[in-house]
Amino acid sequence: MAFTVRPSPKDIEAIEYAKKHFRTTKQTEALLKACQEMEANHKRIEDLIKKYQDQMHELRECKGLLAKLKRPLLELLESDIGT
């Protein structure tokens, strides 16, 4: 299950328009800075999602191992209690 976070087509269109027509205005510089921050935030979100997915995979593996060990451990405990 992969998640991607991307700017909307309208955001991309606005960014491209600003880059072409308003390169020197302070508002455009602020817009471009905000867009760069937005892209950095999207990257961080994607990294966090990937980290979460990796941890969930590890958790599933641990859960599977625990299920495999549960029965032999219970049998061992029962045999120790019985003796």
Image: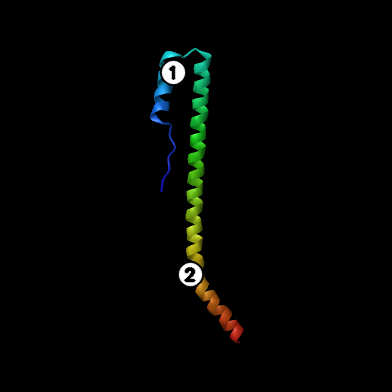
Observer-nearest residue: 12 or 65?
A: 12
Observer-nearest residue: 27 or 40?
A: 27
Residue 12, compared with residue 20, is above or below; it is below
Instruction: Tell me: 81 left or right of 38.
Output: right
Return the x and y of residue 20 as percentages of the image width and height: 41, 16
Please identify the quadrant where the C terminus is shown.
Answer: bottom right
Q: Which residue is mark 2?
A: 68
- Secondary structure of the residue carrying tag 2 is helix
The numbered dot on residue 18 is 1
Q: How is the image coloured?
A: rainbow
Mark in front: 2 vs 1: 1
N-terminal of the pair, mark 2 or mark 1, is 1
Q: Amino acid at mark 1?
A: Ala
Residue 81, compared with residue 52, is above or below; it is below
Q: Quadrant of residue 17?
A: top left
What residue is rendered at 42% in x and 40% in y? 4
